[in-house]
Amino acid sequence: MVGPACVRRCSRAADALFVIEIIAHMHSDYAGFVAWLRSPTGMIPMVLLLIALFHHAALGLKVVVEDYLHGLVKFSALVAVRLGAVALAVAGILAVLFIALSG
């Protein structure tokens, strides 16, 4: 049976492998990076990174907005933060998919 501890260990291992791959491609040229991004071991973690990145950014900005804004401005800012994070995440994911799936 797979428990939460096993899932955490697998997630940490996958994160470590992704970081190692990013570091390994740090000095590669554009063609090398695109070739790596076209592989499933590059594309899938990159999409997951974009999702986690913009989710985390939205949560952080939400806290700032809730602490420092009030009334209708607060509501408008919260909607803008959420829509902005979703729009940027979708744009990033579409860019990765375009690179990965283009011939």
Image (tube, rainbow, N blue to C red):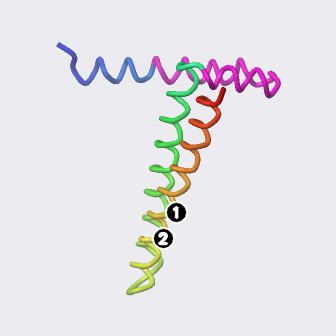
Examine the structure image and report whether residue 21 is included in the region drawn in magenta. yes
Disc ID at residue 80: 2
Q: Residue tagged by mark 1?
A: 84
Residue 22, by quadrant, is: top right
Q: Check whether the beta carbons of the residues at disc 2 and disc 1 lie within 8 A of each other.
A: yes
Amino acid carrying label 2: it is: Ala
Q: Secondary structure at mark 2?
A: helix
Q: Residue at x 41, y 84 (%)?
A: 70
Q: Residue at x 48, y 70 (%)?
A: 80
Q: 20 left or right of 61?
A: right
Point out residue 41 in the picture as x, y percentages from the top left corner.
54, 19
Question: Foreground: 55 or 30?
Answer: 30
Above-or-below relation of 55 to 2: below
Q: What whole-number distance in Å separates the C-alpha atoms at marks 2 and 1?
A: 6 Å
Examine the structure image and report whether residue 65 is included in the region drawn in magenta. no
**Boundaries of the magenta span:** 13-38
